[in-house]
Image (spheres, helix red, strand yellow):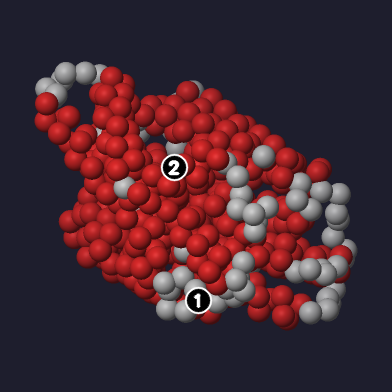
């Protein structure tokens, strides 16, 4: 059900992405992204890891959930007040007066979402995945529909503001309607300090991850303005949609499977290698194809006014070839109980990413995207592989062997598409026809590579059988 909902959400989000990009200029997206980069960080503070506490704790009671609810509510209200009062400072920082009303209206979302955190967590704890999928999909549809209507009537960037508020509002109403739990009055709760400590450690880790994803947009918006930030943010959004949709199910499936095998080293090691190999085979050639055809994709999806985003999308495609595998490595830390090492690895990865962003910033948005791509391939991925294999049954050579077939397929796919482009005149075909030809050539190169290499050939045969190993069945 989760996979089905993810697929439907991708279709809806890409559809809205296409329509809104043709109704609004890049500067509109850039203005909202300036505020969104900050609110993404504050959203982690507002939640404070308490949804994870409610889901993870085996014997949590009504009093404890109520205490967490009131903390989330207070945190959301305080964050909203801080944004409301600090909106003029944000506008001064970016030198964009329009940010004052944008920030103050978006602050309302923190009040609404603070009231929703524990209801969402309880729905997940109860494994009501159908209800969750219906609410999230419905909120997406409502938000996008109203945003498109506002944009069609000339609302400009307010369409994007309304979209975010509608999504949160629908989520609040629906979660309270579906989850019948109601909080008790504020009061002391047993084990609250321990739960706060757990939530704090989760918050620190998530804050570092979100900061890494947001600081480039903050700096680009500050130095280069909303139009360039809008092109950069939309290109990043286009690539992150499929990555987030892939890694969610990977964690949902991989976490229980690996946790069951944590004390069986050989089986654990084999399963990790198989999971990484199949994830890499699914994602690396696909993103290499995206990188090789980024200009066609941008023209088709966003329209001619967005051609400045094409080189950025191409570089993000290069970055994305390794990113799903790197993100999935967190499964090893969590399933082995290595949370302190995971936190340290997150800080190291964030430091590498931020250093790359700062190095590329003098060269503009394209320079930042290029630095991120280079650091991802040459530094982040090798360091992540080395750190995660310092302890535990999985060895460094296991990970490199797992990604080797997909790496070869990605390189050959990109080379084949590049060769095709050299044979085609610049105006030989419309983007749809060009992409179709590139897709056929890329898929053929990928298939031939996988069939030629023994490891990937065995993996393809295993996929045909579609069964779990006996020790997981």
On the image, the x and y values in percent for residue 184 come to 88, 63
Quadrant showing the N terminus? top right
Q: CA distance from mark 1 to mark 2?
A: 28 Å
Please, what secondary structure does the residue beneath circle 1 have?
A: loop
Q: On the rendered structure, is 335 left or right of 400?
A: right
Q: Quadrant of residue 61?
A: bottom right
Picture disc at residue 460: 2
Question: Which of the two residues, 181 or 265, is positioned nearer the viewer here?
Answer: 265
| Above-or-below relation of 271 to 192 | above
Q: Quadrant of residue 5?
A: top right
Q: Which circle's residue, 1 or 2, is located before the other in the chain?
A: 1
Q: Residue at x 50, y 66 (%)?
A: 269
| Above-or-below relation of 466 to 12 | below
Question: Which of the two residues, 282 or 85, is positioned nearer the viewer here?
Answer: 282
On the image, the x and y values in percent for residue 455 come to 38, 51
Q: Which residue is mark 1?
A: 392
Q: Residue at x 45, y 37 (%)?
A: 157
Q: How many marks?
A: 2
Q: Residues within 10 Å of mark 2 (few under 14, many from 20)?
A: some
Q: Residue at x 42, y 29 (%)?
A: 18
Q: On the rendered structure, is 66 left or right of 226?
A: right
On the image, the x and y values in percent for residue 217 come to 36, 55
Judge whether residue 139 can be spotted in this image. no
Question: Which of the two residues, 335 or 29, is positioned nearer the viewer here?
Answer: 335
Q: On the rendered structure, is 21 left or right of 440?
A: right
Question: Which of the two residues, 49 or 78, is positioned nearer the viewer here?
Answer: 49
Judge whether residue 457 can be spotted in this image. yes
């Amino acid at each position: 059900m989760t996979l089905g909902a993810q697929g439907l959400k991708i279709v809806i989000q890409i559809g809205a992405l296409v329509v809104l990009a043709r109704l609004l200029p890049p500067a509109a997206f850039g203005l909202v992204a300036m505020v969104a980069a900050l609110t993404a960080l504050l959203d982690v503070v507002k939640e404070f890891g308490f949804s994870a506490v409610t889901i993870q704790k085996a014997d949590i009671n009504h009093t404890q959930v109520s205490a967490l609810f009131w903390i989330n509510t207070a945190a959301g209200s305080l964050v909203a007040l801080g944004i409301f009062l600090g909106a003029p400072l944000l506008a001064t920082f970016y030198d964009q007066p329009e940010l004052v009303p944008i920030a103050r209206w978006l602050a309302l979302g923190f009040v609404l979402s603070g009231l929703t955190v524990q209801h969402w967590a309880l729905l997940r704890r109860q494994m009501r995945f159908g209800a969750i999928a219906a609410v999230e999909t419905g909120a997406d549809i409502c938000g996008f529909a109203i945003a498109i209507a506002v944009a069609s009537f000339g609302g400009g960037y307010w369409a994007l503001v309304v979209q975010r508020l509608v999504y949160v509002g629908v989520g609040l109403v629906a979660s309270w309607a579906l989850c019948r739990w109601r909080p008790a009055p504020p009061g002391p709760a047993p084990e609250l300090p321990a739960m706060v400590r757990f939530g704090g450690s989760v918050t620190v880790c998530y804050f570092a991850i979100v900061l890494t994803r947001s600081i480039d947009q903050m700096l680009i918006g500050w130095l280069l303005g909303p139009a360039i930030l809008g092109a950069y943010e939309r290109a990043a959004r286009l690539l992150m949609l499929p990555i987030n949709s892939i890694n969610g199910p990977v964690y949902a499936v991989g976490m229980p499977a690996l946790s069951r095998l944590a004390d069986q080293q050989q089986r654990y090691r084999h399963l990790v290698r198989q999971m990484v190999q199949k994830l890499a085979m699914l994602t690396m050639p696909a993103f290499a194809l995206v990188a090789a055809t980024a200009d066609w994709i941008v023209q088709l999806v966003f329209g001619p006014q967005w051609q400045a985003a094409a080189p950025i999308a191409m570089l993000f495609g290069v970055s994305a070839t390794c990113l799903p595998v790197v993100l999935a490595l967190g499964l090893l830390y969590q399933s082995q109980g290595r949370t302190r090492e995971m936190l340290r690895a997150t800080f190291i990865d964030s430091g590498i990413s931020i250093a790359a962003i700062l190095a590329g910033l003098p060269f503009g948005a394209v320079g930042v995207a290029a630095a991120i791509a280079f650091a991802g391939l040459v530094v982040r991925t090798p360091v992540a592989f080395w750190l995660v294999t310092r302890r535990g049954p999985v060895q460094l050579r296991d990970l490199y062997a797992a990604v080797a077939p997909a790496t070869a397929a990605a390189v050959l796919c990109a080379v084949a598409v590049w060769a095709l482009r050299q044979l085609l005149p610049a105006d030989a075909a419309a983007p749809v026809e060009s992409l179709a030809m590139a897709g056929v050539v890329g898929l053929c190169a990928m298939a031939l590579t996988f069939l030629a290499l023994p490891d990937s050939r065995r993996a393809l045969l295993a996929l045909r059988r579609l069964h779990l190993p006996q020790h997981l069945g």
